[in-house]
Image (cartoon, rainbow, N blue to C red):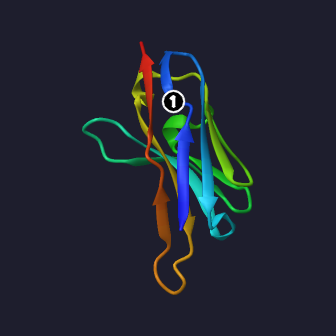
Amino acid sequence: QVQLVESGGGLVQAGGSLRLSCAASGRVFSIIAMGWYRQAPGHQRELVAQITGGGMPSYADSVKGRFTISRNNDMVYLQMNSLKSEDTAVYFCNAITPGDGRPPVNYWGQGTQVTVSS
């Protein structure tokens, strides 16, 4: 089992910055990738950024050049710059562990609200 706790959300003006943090606990050694998803009202949850165990990041096209994901042991961060109103959403931390012969297992944090005012 992996537990995830996010922090760092809040209200910011358009063009501003926020840094989200996620602390992982439990079977952290088994995590093969971590990432950030977001869900805006009336929309499906979407992948924002992901980083593999080897440190390779990937980003949604909508945030490339503005967001940076990083990981340090049991912490994963999302630095968000040049925020836009369309970045407003609940942001969820995600961790993936192998399924031991079954599909990979996804773990989720409780979510943190990011609101960008225009």
Q: Position of residue 108 (x, y in %)?
A: 46, 55
Other residues around mark 1 within 10 Å, as few (<14) / some (14–19) / many (≥20): some
Residue 81 lies, with reference to residue 4, above or below; the image says above
Residue drawn at x 55%, y 16% is 15
Residue drawn at x 64%, y 70% is 30
Q: Position of residue 78 (x, y in %)?
A: 61, 38
Residue drawn at x 44%, y 42% is 111
For this view, does 46 lie left or right of residue 58? Answer: left
Secondary structure found at label 1: loop
Q: Is residue 37 or residue 21 the one in the foreground?
A: 21
Residue 81 lies, with reference to residue 22, above or below; the image says above
Residue 46 lies, with reference to residue 27, above or below; the image says above
Q: Position of residue 72 (x, y in %)?
A: 75, 49
For this view, does 26 lie left or right of residue 55? Answer: left
Of all residues, the one furthest to the bottom in this rendering is 101
Q: Report the amino acid beneath label 1.
A: Gly
Number of marks in the rendered image: 1
Q: Position of residue 12 (x, y in %)?
A: 50, 17
Q: Quadrant of the C terminus?
A: top left
Residue drawn at x 54%, y 36% is 63
Of all residues, the one furthest to the left in this rendering is 42
Q: Looking at the rendering, which quadrant does residue 27 occupy?
A: bottom right
Residue for badge 1 = 9
Residue 77 lies, with reference to residue 100, above or below; the image says above
